[in-house]
Image (cartoon, coloured by chain):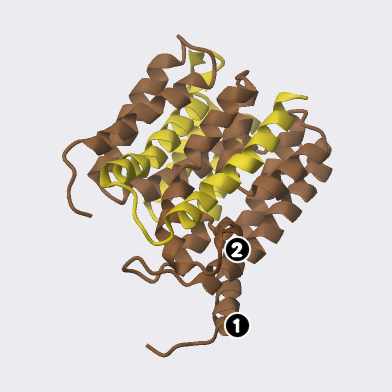
Chain colours: A yellow, B brown
Amino acid sequence: MTAVWTSIVVLAVANFVIKAAGPVLLGGRELPRPVLDVIALLAPAILAALVVVGTFSEDRSLRIDAQTAGVAVAGAAFVLRASMLVAIFLGALTAALLRAL
Amino acid sequence: MMRRDSSSEFRTGIQAGLAFALPTFVLAVSFGVLARSLDWGVVAPIVFSAVVFSGSAQFAVADVLDAGGSAIAAIVAAILVNARFAVMGVAVASSLHGGRIRRALEAQATVDASWAIANRGGGRFERDVLIGATLPQYIAWVGGTALGVLVGDAVDAEALGLDVLFPAFFLGLLIEELRRGRRQVAAAAIACAVSLALVPLTPPGIPIIAACLGALLGLWGRRAP
C-alpha cells in the first residue's frame, strides 16, 4: 500500500475517534484543566509550523520566492479581515503574476 | 428564548452552511488539482475527501508527503492539526443526543465553520444547526475534490499560484487562533522558531511535529477561562 492510501485509511479512523472521543467518553464532564490548556494551544502551534515550513522551505533548505510573496499577500488580507476565499484568491493571484513576469 | 422545533433549526443550519459551501468547494477543487499534480491518481483524493472530510488534515498530508516525508510523519502531523476537534468535541459533548454510537456519529458533524455557527455561548451548542450546517459543506468538499481531480491534468498548478493555497489556508486558520489571545501568539512563535531551525537538520515532517512543543506553554501561568 502506498503512503497516500496508508494515510487515508489511518486518518479516516483517527479523525472519527478524535471527533467522537469527547461526546462518547465524557458525556457532559470536562477534561482536567491543564490537558485542555495544552490541547487548546496545539492548533496555533501546528498551524504556525505548517505555514512557515510550507512557505519558507524547499526540501531541506530555506528560500523566499513567488509562493512566499503570495502567502504574505494572503496573510495581509486575513489581517484586514478579508474572507478565506478572497484572501486565498489574492495570494494565488500574486504568485501567478510574479511567475508570469 | 422561544423554543424552535428541530427541523427548523436543521434548516437554519443548512442555510448557514450554504454560505461556507462556495469557499469549501473552491478549496476542494484546488485540493483535487494539487493531489493530481502529486500523482495521487483519481480515486485516492476523492476517497480521502469522502472518508476524512478535513481540509487541514488532507493539506497537512499533502505537505508532508510532497516534501518527502514518510506516511507516519504525515499521519502524525495531520492528527496534531486536527487535535482541535477533540477540544471542540468536548465542548459539544453535552449538546448531542442519544447513546454512545449515535453521539459518536453526530460528533462527526464537527467541522470548524459548523462548530462556530452552532455555538450558542456558555458552553451550549445547537445540535440540529451543527449537523445541518455541515451537510452542504460535505457535499461541496467531496464534489469539489472530484472536479479538481478530473480537470487536474489540464491545469498547471504552479502557474496559477495554487501552491499558495495550502499555506494560505493554514495562515487563515492560524490568524483566527492568534486573535484568541497572547498565549496562542506565544505558542505560534515558539512553533515557528522550532520548526524553521529543524528544517535543515531533520527529515521532512519532523519540524512540524516538533513544533507542538509550543503547546506546552499551556502548562504555565494558567488563568481562569
Task: Tell which circle, 2 or 1, labels the residue nearer the N-terminal end.
Answer: 1
- Pick the front one: A58 or A66: A58
Position of A69 with respect to A45 (left or right) is right
Q: Gap in Å between the C-alphas at discs 2 and 1?
A: 18 Å
Residue corresponding to mark 1 = B7
Which callout, 2 or 1, points to the residue nearer the camera?
2
Q: Is residue B79 above or below residue A23?
A: above
Residue corresponding to mark 2 = B102
- Pick the front one: A61 or A37: A37
- Identity, as a three-letter code, of the amino acid under mark 1: Ser
- Chain bearing mark 2: B
The picture quadrant where one finds residue B12 is bottom right
Q: Is residue A41 visible?
A: yes
Q: Is residue A71 above or below residue A59?
A: below
For this orientation, the residue located farthest to the top is B201
- Identity, as a three-letter code, of the amino acid under mark 2: Arg
The residue drawn where x is 31% and y is 28% is B190
Could you tell me residue B181's position as x and y percent? 26, 48
Q: Is residue A98 visible?
A: no
The residue drawn where x is 71% and y is 60% is B139
- Chain bearing mark 1: B
- Pick the front one: B124 or B37: B124
The residue drawn where x is 27% and y is 42% is A34
Dot 2 lies on which element?
helix
Could you tell me residue B169's position as x and y percent? 52, 44
